[in-house]
Image: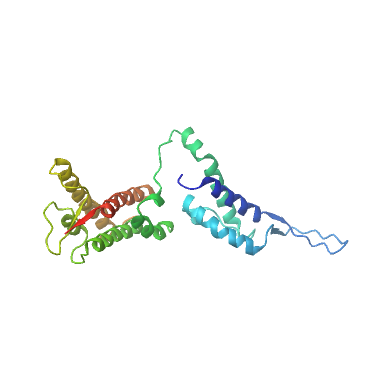
Amino acid sequence: MSIDIAWARAELDRFLELTELRPLDHSPGDVIVFSTRKITRAAEKDIVASAHVVEQILDRMLPRWRDEVPRNDRVNRWYQHREAAQRAVVVLDRDAEIRQRLGDDAPQVSAAALHPWVWERARPLWQGGHFREAVTAAARKVNAETQNKLGRKDVSETNLFKQAFSQDLPKPGQPRLRLREDDGGDTYRNVHRGAMAFAEGCYAAIRNPNSHEDELPELPEQEALEQLAAFSVLARWVDNATVIT
């Protein structure tokens, strides 16, 4: 898990301590008053400050926690946060063990580790459960950044990448992207032909159906993550490429 586990665990533990419920003391002087009402251990301002950090940890570790973890405002405003934090602690402590015991200790893809063009544009939609729209937004961002890098607004998406990775010499107004130096070898030709075909596949087979077909069912989260990863590969190629004019 690509986060600072010790830091995240400490923040979660602190939040759970601050929001621990204790009996309300109504006892004036020597008079004892019994009450079932409970209050949090810490002041509300301290909890709010801690919650600001904890919510970001939960968004990273349990992206659907706001929908999947039940609320119970009758008990306490922080009931949902507390249960989500408790679940996150278990993930931090036992995720590797659980995956190993269940026979799945393969490496995992972290959405936050994808290229910034992809994840930063997709994240707000993703956290709301709009996976198909998140992929479409990422595709648009990669297209826009490629246009910016090449200084081109006259073409987009498939045609943009076909021209960008073309092995033809650049022309006025048509610069090229180069992933490696031209040594006249097969690898140079294969890399750029493959990048062109890969980009066409991303936009023709992923971006276009996602954005042009009405009433499509929501993408499964895993499938959407794989599609984001495809655009992340393309984004890194473009970002690292050299522009030749």
Report x, y in % for residue 46: 63, 61
Tell me where residue 170 appears, x and y as whole percent: 13, 58
Residue, far bottom: 153
Horizontal placement of 73 versus 149: left or right?
right
Name the residue located 57 percent from the left edge and 55 percent from the top edge: 81
Q: Name the residue: 75% across, 60% down.
A: 24
Number of dots carrying numbers: 0
**Near-viewer residue (42 or 238):** 238
For the C terminus, give its image quadrant. Answer: bottom left
Picture coordinates of residue 164, whole percent (x, y)? 18, 56
Query: Would you identify the image quadrant in which residue 121 lies?
Result: bottom left
Q: Does 52 appear above or below 61?
A: below
Q: Is residue 154 visible?
A: yes
In this view, which residue lies farthest toward the right? Answer: 30
Q: Colour scheme used in the picture?
A: rainbow
Q: Is residue 87 visible?
A: no
In the visual, does 203 lie left or right of 108? left
Q: Position of residue 219 (x, y in %)?
A: 35, 52
Q: Is residue 183 left or right of residue 142?
A: left
Residue at horizontal 33 percent and vertical 60 percent from the top: 137
